[in-house]
Image: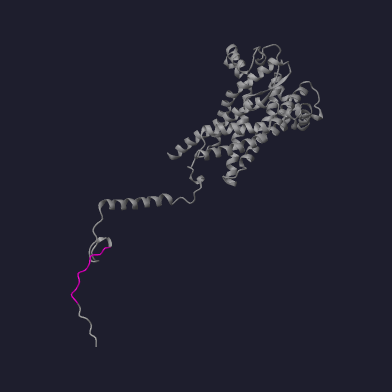
């Protein structure tokens, strides 16, 4: 029988190589102070990071936009009124110089009409005086646009650059206020129903707003033109309107409505769609939540220029139809049947070719681009000012 070997003497326990420590009963030495501080800082920032990331549900940039207080309709009216007046003051001198150059090359006889634009809308003006008393008949002997600017300022004073402006503002400012306020109100309504990212909202809102503004202002513009051609008392003006309505019906007060809509409604749809698109693209390009003054200015100028080129044929037709309507009315001749908008357009193409529909492209661009840029950037600046005021009041 084999016996088990005798147990030898107990061997000493070797120190553990793990972490350079001895056997399990040994107590771990405390970590150095720097390590403790690092652990505390890591724990603190992990808690803070969880707190800050907890409200974030998605990474959509739209959800990170700061909350902005809405602008009231009255504040929109004030902003659009300020923009309209400033636009008129900046753009009217261009049209005054253009009319003076036209009158120099082709004398305006009594009863002849011409189109006056103050940067906001067109107005039909009638030559009512013989001689050189009227501002557009004053002799200047201009050699060009710049020469006309300098001579008018030097010989007639700087106020002459705004000749004929005050009467037109009576119509242009209310029309602009109605247009811009309605656009913003409709845009807000449609966004609440269809969502913020619906791309067709600017088109619909622009069409409806322009349709309403033209419909309201068109009869008033007809009355203003009639008052300009002859000094009417209020009683005589009432008799004129009553006679016109009884003879031709209420629709006669909107005689220039159709060609104006054909030009202004497509212009408005293209302008607002391209403006909102350009503004959003520029904001994304420069990493901005809200557009700056220069982004609004650039977007307004580019979108206005594009819309002006596309709708120029309707502008040519509108101007010609307004002029013909006045000539027939002033000479008490019955209006011919071929005075429809499409008939006038065909007549222009037959006489001057397709290029005849784009007559005056350069002067129109020179006038429309700055007018759109100044108006929209001033309007947006006014709204941003009121938004800031409303936000500060809400935080108090």
Q: Nearer the viewer, residue 72 or 287?
A: 287
Above or below 375: residue 30? below
Identify the image quadrant of residue 318. top right
Q: Main secondary structure of the magenta part?
A: loop
Identify the image quadrant of residue 8. bottom left
Above or below 121: residue 35? below
Residue 185 seen in the current view: yes
> Which image quarter is the N terminus in?
bottom left
Residue 238 falls left or right of residue 148: right
- Residue at 58%, 24% (x, y): give it: 90
Residue 298 falls left or right of residue 2: right
Q: Position of residue 33 (x, y in %)?
A: 25, 52
Indicate yes or no whether the magenta region holds residue 10.
Answer: yes
How many numbered markers are drawn?
0
- Residue at 20%, 78% (x, y): give it: 7
Q: Position of residue 107 (x, y in %)?
A: 71, 15
Q: Position of residue 361 (x, y in %)?
A: 67, 27
Residue 379 seen in the current view: no
Q: Which residues are magenta?
A: 8-17
């Amino acid at each position: 029988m084999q016996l088990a070997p005798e147990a030898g003497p107990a061997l000493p326990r070797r120190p553990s190589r793990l972490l350079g420590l001895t056997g399990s009963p040994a107590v771990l030495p405390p970590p150095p102070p720097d390590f403790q501080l690092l652990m505390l800082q890591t724990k603190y920032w992990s808690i803070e990071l969880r707190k800050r990331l907890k409200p974030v549900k998605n990474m959509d940039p739209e959800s990170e936009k700061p909350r902005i207080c809405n602008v009231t309709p009255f504040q929109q009216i004030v902003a659009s009124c300020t923009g309209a007046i400033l636009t008129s003051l900046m753009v009217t001198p261009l049209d005054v110089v253009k009319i003076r150059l036209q009158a120099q090359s082709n004398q305006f006889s009594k009863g002849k009409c011409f189109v006056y634009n103050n940067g906001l809308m067109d107005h039909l003006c009638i030559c009512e005086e013989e001689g050189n008393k009227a501002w557009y008949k004053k002799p200047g002997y201009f050699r060009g646009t710049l020469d006309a600017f300098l001579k008018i300022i030097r010989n007639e004073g700087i106020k002459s650059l705004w000749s004929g402006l005050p009467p037109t503002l009576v119509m242009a400012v209310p029309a602009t206020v109605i247009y811009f306020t309605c656009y913003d109100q409709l845009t807000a309504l449609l966004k609440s129903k269809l969502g913020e990212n619906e791309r067709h909202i600017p088109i619909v809102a622009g069409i409806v707003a322009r349709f309403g503004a033209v419909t309201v202002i068109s009869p008033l513009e007809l009355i203003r033109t009639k008052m300009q051609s002859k000094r009417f008392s209020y009683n005589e003006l009432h008799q004129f309107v009553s006679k016109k309505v009884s003879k031709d019906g209420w629709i006669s007060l909107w005689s220039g409505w159709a060609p104006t809509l054909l030009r202004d409604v497509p212009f408005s749809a293209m302008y607002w769609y391209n403006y909102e698109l350009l503004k959003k693209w520029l904001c994304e390009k420069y990493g901005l939540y809200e557009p700056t003054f220069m982004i609004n200015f650039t977007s307004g100028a580019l979108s206005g220029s594009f819309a002006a080129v596309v709708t120029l044929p309707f502008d040519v037709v509108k101007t010609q139809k307004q002029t013909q309507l006045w000539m027939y009315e002033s000479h008490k001749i019955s209006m011919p049947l071929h005075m429809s908008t499409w008939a006038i357009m065909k007549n222009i193409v037959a006489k001057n070719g397709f290029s005849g529909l784009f007559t005056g492209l350069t002067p129109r661009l020179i006038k429309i681009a700055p007018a759109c840029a100044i108006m929209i950037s001033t309007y947006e600046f006014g709204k941003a000012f009121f938004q800031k005021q409303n936000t500060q009041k809400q935080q108090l």
